[in-house]
Amino acid sequence: MLKNNALLGFVLGLLAPAFGFLLVFVLLHQDIPLAAFLKGLMQSHTNAAKVLSLSILTNLIPFFYYYNRRADQTAKGVLSATILFALLILLLKYVW
């Protein structure tokens, strides 16, 4: 039985982009070390926003998984984490 818990969804929504970040690194930037990649992201907030935007696409997987199984509270938690990441992307792109 699926747990229908917003906190579970929020945690999944925070962890899935970490996997997405590693996926973006492995697929697009495997020719440089991870430390150099992270340093480059810290120096260029525009690039950080782009990488983070690609990373949060992995939230689609848990969102639709729980949404299609009618675990709406868990899907709501994933959506909340996604909105939090979207605000971070806006800050990185336009404020900092």
Image (spheres, rainbow, N blue to C red):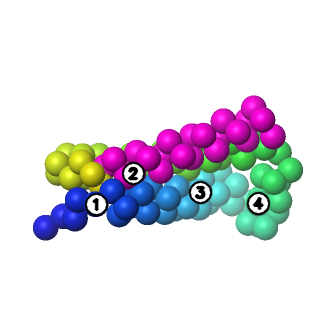
Q: Looking at this view, name the residue that lies furthest to the left.
A: 1
Under mark 4, the amino acid is: Leu
Crowd band around label 2 with a 10 angstrom C-alpha radius: few (<14), some (14–19), many (20+): many
Of pointers 4 and 2, the one earlier in the residue sequence? 4
SS at circle 3:
helix
Q: Nearer the viewer, residue 6 or 67?
A: 6
Under mark 3, the amino acid is: Phe
Residue 38: mark in rendering: 4
- Can you give x and y, in whole percent of width and height, for residue 31 in the image? 74, 60
- Contact, mark 3 vs mark 4 (Cβ under 8 Å): no
Point out the image quarter for the C terminus: top right
Q: Nearer the viewer, residue 41 or 91?
A: 91
Disc 1 versus disc 3: nearer the observer: 1
Question: Which residue matches tag 3?
Answer: 21
Q: Main secondary structure of the magenta part?
A: helix
Under mark 2, the amino acid is: Val
